[in-house]
Amino acid sequence: MSSKEKPTLGGTRIKTRKRNIAASLDPAAFSDAVVQIYLENAGDLELVAKSIESSELNFSRYGDTFFEVVFTGGRTQPGTTKPDEGERHPYSFLDCEPKRDAVLPSVIYVQKVLRRRPFLIKNLENVMRRFLQSLELCEEDERKKLAIFSALAFSQKLSGLPPETVLQPLLKDNLVAKGIVLAFITDFFKEYLLDNSLDDLISILKRAKMEDNLLEFFPSSKRTAEAFSEHFTKEGLLQLVEYNEKKIFEEKLKEMKSALTTLIAEEADQSEVLDVVKQRVADAKLPEIEVVRILWDVLMDAVQWSGKNQQQNANAALRQVRTWANLLNTYCTSGKLELELLYKVQMQCYEDAKLMKLFPDIVRALYDQDVLAEDTILHWFRKGTNPKGRQTFVKSLEPFVNWLEEAEEEE
């Protein structure tokens, strides 16, 4: 036997492993078959859905092609929205009127298909992403139909369609700059809010990680709060305008609170703190009542509470009141604002067990520093409207109120 020959066992049958032979892709034939189903049923989507359900077409391989036929009536050129060669049908939603009643049947039809073949959701995402990234290649009424379809897809809770798939592709610089995205998202918002609440819409925007950057839908030259309000007010979406204004307002409060917290932690000079407060109040146009609330929160958050010794906590709180009385006085300029401060003190002492017994001491300190007037304290004592802890606090403040009333009688 030659050294190069391999030994074999006589009569042994050598088996070779079968290999998977990939069939060549044929999206054109698949597309033509789906188009034929549409044509045979004259575009009746209920009948089309039944025929699709009973067909043995290879949807797992040609899912993208299927949704191209749904959207445009036939196959599109790879990576584009342009029609490709092959048969087409005239019953796609991009061929219908740009109205809800005309588009809704297509959404319901897609929903039926996805219930039968849920794996196709990924293919729907692929095709929607491609179309939305190519909005500039679409006619204006086609963009409107895509916006209506997208809104209805979420309104009908189309199985598993993630908001980021629909909304994130819109933020292409060239689409935004041309105002195409703003027009699309406006139609989307208007359509969605016909059947759903603003909270539902915000939920979608949050899931898409876009609730904090709604201005990015605007061209850079119009990316201002004023432009946002003007545009959506004109479009009749006042609830969205109010939501955005509230969000901006809350952000300004947060920024002011953060700046004050830093200054106080760094033991900045009081005059510097006061200047910063005045500047931020003017820039943000913050109402004085909100300023009073923030000031009290920041001042009390800066106190180093011992958590154990009641007297130490009392001393720390009173020291903070005395130190920053001038700052509080600057904004507690009316009985209404003083009463708001008193309610803040009440809520803090109610919510923090270690401060419960400090309520009368803090009120007395604010009175001694001329932050709270006698009339304000008496009004709260007799007619205060916040019920939280009120019974306890009224009782604890009674000796001080009696003293005030006696002093008033003597005068």
Image (cartoon, rainbow, N blue to C red):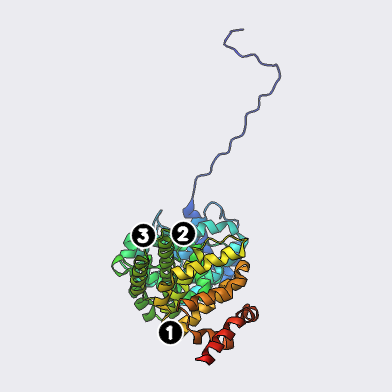
Q: CA distance from mark 3 to mark 1?
A: 51 Å
Q: CA distance from mark 2 to mark 3?
A: 17 Å
Res. 57 image quadrant: bottom right
**Rendered-image quadrant of the N terminus:** top right
Residue name at image x 58 percent, y 8 percent: 3
Between circles 2 and 3, the one closer to the viewer is 3
Q: CA distance from mark 1 to mark 2?
A: 61 Å
Work out whether residue 43 can be spotted. no
Amino acid at circle 2: Val
Q: Position of residue 189 (x, y in %)?
A: 45, 73
Q: Residues within 10 Å of mark 2 (few under 14, many from 20)?
A: many
Q: Residue furthest left?
A: 221
Res. 312 image quadrant: bottom right
Helix, strand or loop at mark 3: loop
Amino acid at circle 3: Lys
Q: Position of residue 381 (x, y in %)?
A: 58, 85
Between circles 1 and 2, the one closer to the viewer is 1
Where 382 falls versus 157 (above or below)? below
Left or right of 166 on screen, residue 5: right
Q: Residues within 10 Å of mark 3 (few under 14, many from 20)?
A: some
Residue 127's disc is 2
Q: Position of residue 302 (x, y in %)?
A: 49, 63
Helix, strand or loop at mark 2: helix
Where 333 falls versus 119 (above or below)? below
Residue 172's disc is 3
Q: Nearer the viewer, residue 321 or 284?
A: 321
Residue 334's disc is 1
Q: Nearer the viewer, residue 186 or 381?
A: 381
Amino acid at circle 1: Ser
Work out whether residue 115 can be spotted. yes
First in residue order: circle 2 vs circle 3:
2
Whether the residues at callouts 1 and 2 have beta carbons within 8 Å, the answer is: no
